[in-house]
Image: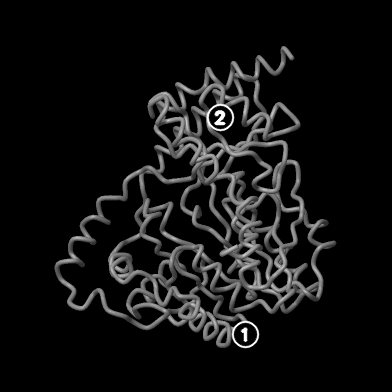
């Protein structure tokens, strides 16, 4: 076999998200895109704000040498601008030296994992979780250890108490959460930080938060930087600016992290040696020119309202998400994969909770046209009625 047996095995169990997306592409070819209701992929569909296009045009026209190499951590002026953004959002200023520009949030996570993990070190993650985390951790010799959450998908501190130990190197949280949309409270995060200080004082709390700006009903996302100095933020501009394909993100290290200098030096080193080298030069220049703008978040809020009301009216159970652009309703069948197959008969594509480590649920992305939601709801109702009729 030409490829690694390990990779071949991982490919068999790889992301349900992409698997459903590919199945959706086949259905669209067969039935026409307008007759397929694809809620499988969290691919932001709203255009970037007008300020982005203006900045992009200005940078492309004005800056000489924009496509050359720069320091592996990123352009100094971009890092300074991002540090100001972090200070505004988090109430903690990492300083330009505490920011490293990365190839999206995925790049940031792989950098921090590579910088921190020795073989066999554990990364503790609450369930449900973004499925790529397992592969990211394995990339760098770590072991993913999952802990359950509460019935409302909040952090279960008792479960963390049992899971944390001297071999824990990173605790990884994602808020607003993909797939549930849950936002963890400052009180809960602070308690988690205190628990880590007691059980695994050398471990770092890493927050993956590309959905930070996408919240509803007046919610604000508390900062891990505000609850413990042993903290790092990894994020991107993929969702709040609609730039998923541009792969631009960053990591920010708490200014009082006790291993800050070594951690930053290691992160810069692995940013290069993992093959990222540096974050995209053009996008770094653009980001440095933008104020705190976002896509039109009211569109996502309206879609959430329509989808949630329609599913509940049809008889589905679903926790109200506080952020992101996903719903995570309970599957009416214990076998969530079987439920996904039943929905396919209505040409509705969703992702089973099994793919996120949480069987018995399904994830629906409402990064789709509102009309698609309206036209799909009768199909959701018909499938549930068939299941209830046996």
Q: Residue at x 69, y 59 (%)?
A: 125
Q: Left or right: 90 with respect to 184? A: left
x and y percentages locating residue 55 in the rendered image: 23, 61
Q: Left or right: 349 with respect to 34? A: right
- Within 10 Å of disc 1 (Cα), the crowding (few <14, some 14-19, many 20+) is some
Nearer-the-camera pick, 317 or 297: 317
Nearer-the-camera pick, 104 or 153: 104
Q: Which residue is mark 1?
A: 259
- Within 10 Å of disc 2 (Cα), the crowding (few <14, some 14-19, many 20+) is many
Q: Where, quadrant-wise, is the N terminus in this rendering? A: bottom right
Q: Quadrant of residue 254?
A: bottom right
x and y percentages locating residue 185 in the rendered image: 65, 54
Mark with earlier residue (1, 2) = 1
Q: Secondary structure at mark 1?
A: loop
Q: Which residue is mark 2?
A: 308
x and y percentages locating residue 4 in the rendered image: 61, 65
- Up-down relation of residue 258 to residue 167 (above or below): below
Nearer-the-camera pick, 3 or 217: 3
The image's colouring method is: one colour
């Amino acid at each position: 076999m030409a490829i690694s047996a390990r990779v071949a095995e991982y490919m068999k169990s790889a992301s349900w998200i992409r698997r459903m997306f590919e199945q959706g592409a086949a259905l669209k070819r067969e039935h026409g895109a307008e007759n397929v209701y694809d809620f499988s992929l969290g691919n932001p569909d709203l255009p970037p704000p007008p300020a982005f296009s203006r900045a992009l045009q200005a940078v492309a026209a004005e800056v000489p040498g924009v496509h050359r190499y720069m320091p592996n951590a990123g352009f100094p002026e971009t890092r300074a601008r991002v540090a100001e953004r972090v200070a505004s959002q988090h109430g903690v200023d990492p300083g330009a030296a505490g920011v490293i520009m990365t190839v999206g949030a995925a790049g940031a996570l792989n950098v921090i994992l590579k910088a921190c993990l020795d073989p066999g070190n554990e990364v503790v993650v609450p369930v449900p979780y973004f499925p790529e985390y397992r592969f990211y951790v394995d990339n760098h010799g770590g072991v993913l250890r999952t802990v359950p959450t509460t019935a409302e998908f909040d952090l279960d501190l008792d479960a963390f108490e049992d899971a944390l130990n001297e071999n824990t190197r990173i605790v990884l949280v994602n808020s607003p959460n993909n797939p549930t949309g849950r936002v963890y409270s400052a009180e809960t995060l602070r308690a988690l930080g205190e628990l880590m200080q007691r059980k695994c004082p050398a471990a770092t709390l890493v927050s993956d938060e590309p959905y930070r700006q996408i919240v509803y009903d007046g919610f604000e996302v508390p900062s891990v930087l505000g609850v413990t100095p042993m903290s790092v933020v990894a994020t991107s501009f993929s969702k709040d600016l609609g730039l998923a394909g541009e792969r631009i993100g960053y990591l920010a290290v708490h200014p009082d992290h006790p291993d800050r200098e070594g951690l930053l030096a290691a992160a810069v080193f692995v940013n290069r040696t993992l093959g990222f080298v540096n974050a995209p030069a053009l996008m770094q220049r653009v980001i440095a020119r933008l104020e705190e703008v976002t896509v039109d978040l009211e569109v996502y809020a309206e879609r959430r309202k329509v989808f949630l009301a329609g599913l509940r009216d049809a008889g589905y159970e679903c926790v109200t998400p506080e952020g992101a652009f996903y719903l995570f309703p309970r599957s009416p069948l214990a076998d969530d994969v079987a439920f996904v197959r039943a929905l396919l008969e209505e040409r509705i594509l969703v992702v089973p909770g099994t793919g996120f480590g949480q069987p018995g649920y399904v994830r629906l992305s409402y990064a789709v046209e509102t009309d698609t939601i309206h036209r799909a709801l009768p199909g959701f109702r018909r499938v549930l009625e068939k299941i209830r009729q046996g």
